[in-house]
Amino acid sequence: LLDSITRLARAYNTVTPPSGKVLTGGVDANALHKPKRFFGAARNIEHGGSLTIIATALIDTGSRMDEVIFEEFKGTGNSEIVLDRNISDRRIYPAINVLKSGTRKEELLQKPDELQKIWAIRSAIATMDDVEALKFLYAKMLKTKDNKELLSILNE
């Protein structure tokens, strides 16, 4: 668990000798090398387990450097969970924006029939606002014991 990849990259930017290649926001190109290697270490291990890295990124801080760092890492993760201050301000936890969160390559993780149900649910909640979508899904989750049952009742 890394909180946050942004702070790690900032720290490396402070201590890395200048390379002469400076990205927008004042980030030295070489400063991102070690944070990218760390984040890229996540993998399955054949005949073993896996190494999962969960990292947070700071966004909407007003810092151009933070934006550049975020953009460098944005497409490298397998899943993106977006926390929403508006939801948190309403004291709803976890403050996950379910409309903006998701998993890449979910077709490799789900059976085709389950995937179709998930896409149908996403289409149905896409018209809701962020808080309404989270409350709707949370209420349904409380009434079910597993994902299979949840998908079943949501597709009725």
Image: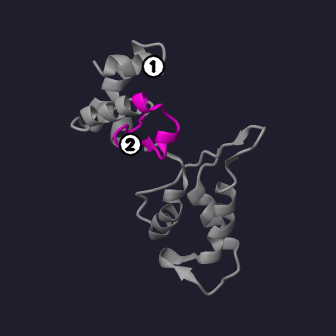
Q: Compared with residue 123, is residue 38 higher up or lower down, i.e. above or below?
A: below
* Residue closest to the far bottom: 20
Task: Give the percent coordinates (x, y) of residue 43.
Answer: 68, 48
Query: In the depicted view, which residue is nearer to us: 77 or 44?
Result: 44
Q: Where is residue 27 in the image (x, y as percent from the top left)?
A: 56, 74
Would residue 141 be visible to someone looking at this image? no
Query: Which residue is identified by label 2?
Result: 84
Residue 44 versus residue 6 in the image, above or below: above
Q: Tell me: 146 left or right of 49.
A: left
Residue for point 23% across, 35% down: 128
Vertical placement of residue 121 versus 37, above or below: above
Q: Which residue sits furthest front?
A: 112
Callout 2 environment at 10 Å: few (<14), some (14 to 19), or many (20+)?
Answer: some
Q: Where is residue 55 in the image (x, y as percent from the top left)?
A: 59, 48
Q: Residue 148 carries which label?
A: 1
Amino acid beneath label 2:
Asp
Residue 128 against residue 147 in the figure, above or below: below
Q: In terms of secondary structure, where does tag 1 sit? A: helix
Dominant secondary structure of the residues highlighted in magenta in the image? loop
Q: Nearer the viewer, mark 1 or mark 2?
A: 1
Identify residue type, mark 1: Lys
| Range of residues picked out in magenta | 95-114
Question: Considering depth in this image, is 59 or 30 the residue closer to the camera?
Answer: 30
**Number of marks present in the image shown:** 2
The quarter of the displayed image where residue 130 is located: top left
Q: Nearer the viewer, residue 107 or 127?
A: 107
